[in-house]
Every structure is written in C-alpha cells, then in structure tokens.
Amino acid sequence: HLVTAKQHKPPDIQRSGEDWFEGVSRHLWQRHLLPLAPFKSYLEIGVFAADSLTWAAEHLLAEDGQAIGVDLWQPARNWSAQVAWMAVAKETAVRRVSDFNSSERRGRKRVMLAQEDSKKFLAAELSNTDEFDLCYIDGCHYAPGALTDFVLAWWKLRPGGVMVADDIGLFRGKRAGPGCLSGEAWCAFVTCFGHLFSVLYDSKDQAAIIKLPDVKKTK
C-alpha cells in the first residue's frame, strides 16, 4: 500500500543512508546516469531513508516522470535496535518524499512510496505492460532475496533501460554457503543474463547494466 506523510517531528538519526549515497552512489550516478537522463520512470527497491530516491527524482527524472520506492522497513533480524533504526528510516523517507512532492523542485514529477515486500510488488507488476526506464536494486542483502529482486526487476526493465545493483561487493565471486549475500546473487544473475545486457559501469560495490534493445526476443 502507498505510504503518505503524517505530522511529526523530523527524526534525529539519518546519517547512515546519506553517508552511503554520498560516499558510493552519487559520484557514479553523476558520471554515468546523468548523461543518460532524463528517465521517464524510476523504480527503487530498498528505499531506507530516501536519499537516493529523492536525488534521482530531482536530477534524473523527466519533467513529467514518475518514481516509486518500495521497502518493508523491516530489519533482517528482530533486534530492538534495528527495529528502531528502520522505523526512523521510514519516518525520514516519508518526510523527504512529502517535502519533495510539495516543493517547487517537483514540477510535474511524482514520487511515491510503497511499504510492501519487493517480491510481491514486482510479481504483481509483471501482470501489466508498464516498464521502467531505470531500476535501482538495494533491497535484501541475502542471496536468495537479492537474486529474486534482480530477476523480477529485470523483466520490468524496458529494452534499453538501465538497472543499477548495489552492495554487490558482499562475498562477490565467493561461495559462502547458506548465508551467502548479494554479491554472490549478482554473480549468478550475470551468469544467466550476461548475454542480454551491456555494462555501463562496474565498481567494487555497485554495477549498472543496460538491457539490450532486442532482449524481448530472447525470453
């Protein structure tokens, strides 16, 4: 279901997402994604505090583009500290998206949040014909969930569209057993789908690929 803003005080803790976006993503996106902008539609799996979502909406979306961020805001383990941390992240994301949608920066752009399991959201999206121009996958960091996000998002990406995969440095290229992480999932995805895309960039922690124009013929 879509998440809307409530009246509340801004949370005090919001540095983690900012530090990751500023330290890892921003310079890569400015270098590689900005030259390809504008994008008509943007999907983000794993919103956290909406640092990347609102930046992409402002700098990468077309003037009449739409962006949607999907997150459960639930920790991998039910530790009280992580539960509180994710609650703050959700509160921050809702506030930031609300601020963006009500600001002059928005123009005709529209940004939405959905608090939903990414697998259910993407599976439901497969039943309609709409496709995304840009997808950013930063959801589950365990291999089964990450691989599911990569594959389902891939089939929602239009030919010629860009998919960005985050945290692929986690056990990348290593067999880590039942606890293997998103790096191993990315290796599996590349093994299966590598002939269907070109690489836009491939860094230690993040990669971006471009879906080949004739990929629908290879389903």
Image: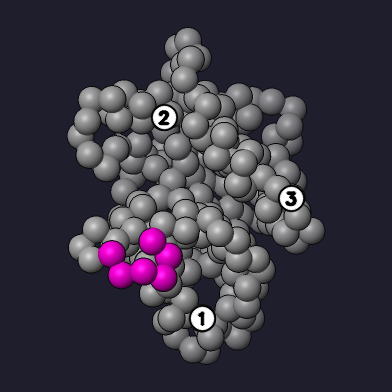
Residue 6 in view in this figure: yes
The residue type indicated by label 3 comes to Gln
- Residue 177 position by quadrant: bottom left
| Magenta-drawn stretch, dominant element (helix, strand or loop) | loop
**Above or below: residue 179 compared with residue 94:** below
| Residue position for label 1 | 194
Q: Residue at x 27, y 42 (%)?
A: 76
What range of the chain is rendered magenta? Answer: 171-176
The residue type indicated by label 2 comes to Lys
| Residue position for label 3 | 30
Give how far apart the Cα atoms at labels 2 and 1 are: 34 Å
Q: Residue at x 38, y 74 (%)?
A: 188
Whether 78 is among the magenta residues is no
Residue 128 placed where, x, y %? 44, 65
**Above or below: residue 171 compared with residue 69:** below
Give how far apart the Cα atoms at labels 3 and 1 are: 25 Å
Left or right of 7, for residue 97: right
Quarter the N terminus occupies = top left
The residue type indicated by label 1 comes to Gly
Residue found at the far top of this picture: 9
Q: Secondary structure at mark 1?
A: helix
Estimate how packed mark 3 is, as few (under 14), some (14 to 19) or many (20 or more) residues with alpha carbons within 10 Å.
few
Q: Which mark is residue 90?
A: 2
Mark 3 and mark 2 in contact? Answer it, CB < 8 Å.
Answer: no
- Residue 87 position by quadrant: top left
Q: Secondary structure at mark 2?
A: helix
